[in-house]
Image: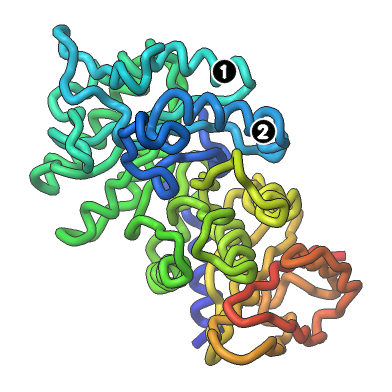
């Protein structure tokens, strides 16, 4: 069974040729910071000045991203989510920022973010209202796209609340994509189209990739292990339909990195970073970079894990076998290498070993005739040279993951 699944996925990854959105951006999974999971819809700046959704929050995050190595690690977008808007449009029908929380306006905020060598992302909704009840873009797609471009926005997260019907949902996502391209400004287009469509009908991922740079498939991430493991399991269960479509210009988005918050143990944080690398996921942190523990910063800035995520071949990884509490995942990389993740789902007891043959990897080709194996997470370690017929025994802590890179000789 595992061999058949592996052959089918490898073939799909090799032959998939979906036409991607041709706007020249997101050739590797975008990386940055997004406010939603950590800061939600905080609008009371008098009571919570450091935590409310305001220009202060985003300028301070831009300052930290520029000063503390985040930009150099690859995180380039500072992204505003819901709740930035005034309750109504202006007299000309344009969206506007809440004047109390964003007194300088979005154009000035974009200029500030750009001055730090970073890019600004913003949020709107395909429907008449955003998920938090602010003005949506329905009926205003071209005007809103022009407004965002005039402000110097570099990414649009386009939510799917209050769309009305599957037809209006799809039409809205298509129309905003066309409107953004019409502005002439390269703007990464982040969609939630398949997530909102799936309860009513199966998404057409070939079409979605023609209009979106990345797209959400599953529920919002929470700061909890249950949330992380449910996202990983959903991805594995649907990998036959979603893995083959991902690639340069268009990516499956399992949602934000919550590393550095409150709900994950160290092992679980390593698992999120490793699995998001394997899944070729957009890496958008949602945490407070101003108050970051050193170990979380080390993990989020880990160059080797990020290199896996950003591998230019652009192939998404997939699960090749599940054996009791263990899962074995692989991701094809450039130069005939593979990333391998060994995930231990057990939530009781101590470390356990998982042993597998290297012939399992890359449909038998990853280590043929020999290969060099490097452990990347949870610590860096050289595993040396192995032959095609070798077996590997990997010790993994409960809810943890060991991330490896297998390079042919």
From this view, report whether residue 99 is shown above or below residue 189: above
Q: Write down the residue under mark 2.
A: 71
The C terminus lies in quadrant:
bottom right
Report x, y in % for residue 287. Answer: 52, 47
Residue 78 seen in the figure: yes
Q: In the picture provided, is 25 more to the left or to the right than 141? A: right
From this view, report whether residue 290 is shown above or below residue 363: above
Residue at 67 percent of width and 37 percent of height = 70
Residue at 75 percent of width and 49 percent of height = 303
Q: In the picture provided, is 242 more to the left or to the right than 292? A: left
Q: Write down the residue under mark 1.
A: 114
Report x, y in % for residue 328. Answer: 60, 78
Which is more N-terminal, label 2 or label 1?
Answer: 2
Choose between 369 and 312: the one closer to the eye.
Answer: 312
Report x, y in % for residue 84. Answer: 32, 28
In terms of secondary structure, where does tag 2 sit? helix
Residue 14 seen in the figure: no
- Disc 1 to disc 2: CB gap under 8 Å: no
Q: In the picture provided, is 189 more to the left or to the right than 144? A: right
> From mark 1 to mark 2, how far is it between C-alphas?
12 Å
């Amino acid at each position: 069974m595992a061999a058949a699944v592996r052959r089918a996925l490898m073939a799909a990854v090799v032959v998939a040729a979906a036409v991607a959105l041709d706007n020249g951006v997101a050739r590797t999974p975008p990386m940055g910071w997004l406010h939603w999971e950590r800061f939600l819809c905080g609008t009371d700046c008098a009571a919570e000045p450091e935590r409310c959704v305001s220009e202060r929050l985003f300028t301070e995050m831009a300052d930290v991203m520029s000063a503390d190595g985040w930009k150099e690690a690859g995180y380039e977008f500072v992204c505003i989510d819901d709740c930035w808007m005034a309750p109504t449009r202006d007299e000309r029908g344009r969206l506007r920022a809440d004047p109390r929380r964003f007194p300088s306006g979005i154009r000035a905020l974009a200029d500030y973010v750009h001055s730090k060598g970073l890019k600004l992302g913003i949020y709107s909704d395909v429907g008449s209202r955003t998920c938090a009840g602010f003005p949506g873009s329905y009926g205003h797609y071209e005007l809103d796209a022009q407004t965002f471009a005039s402000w110097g926005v570099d990414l649009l997260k386009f939510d799917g609340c209050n769309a009305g019907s599957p037809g209006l949902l799809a039409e809205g996502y298509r129309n905003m994509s066309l409107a953004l391209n019409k502005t002439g400004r390269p703007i990464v287009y982040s969609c939630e189209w398949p997530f909102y469509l799936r309860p009513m009908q199966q998404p057409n991922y070939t079409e979605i990739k023609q209009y979106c740079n990345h797209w959400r498939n599953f529920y919002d991430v929470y700061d909890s292990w249950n949330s992380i493991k449910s996202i990983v399991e959903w991805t594995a269960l649907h990998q036959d339909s979603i893995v083959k479509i991902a690639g340069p210009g268009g990516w499956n988005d399992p949602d934000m990195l919550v590393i550095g918050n409150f709900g994950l143990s160290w092992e679980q944080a390593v698992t999120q970073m490793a699995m998001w690398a394997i899944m070729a996921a957009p890496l958008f942190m949602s945490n407070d970079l101003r108050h970051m523990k050193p170990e979380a910063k080390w993990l989020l800035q880990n160059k080797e894990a990020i290199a896996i995520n950003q591998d230019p071949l652009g192939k998404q990884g997939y699960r090749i076998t599940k054996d009791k509490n263990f899962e074995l995942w692989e991701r094809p990389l450039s130069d005939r290498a593979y990333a391998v993740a060994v995930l231990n789902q057990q939530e009781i007891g101590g470390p356990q070993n998982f042993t597998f043959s290297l012939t399992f990897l890359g449909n038998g080709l990853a280590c043929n005739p020999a290969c060099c194996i490097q452990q990347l997470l949870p610590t860096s370690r050289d595993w040396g040279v192995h032959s095609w017929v070798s077996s590997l025994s990997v010790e993994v802590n409960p809810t943890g993951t060991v991330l490896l890179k297998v390079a042919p000789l």
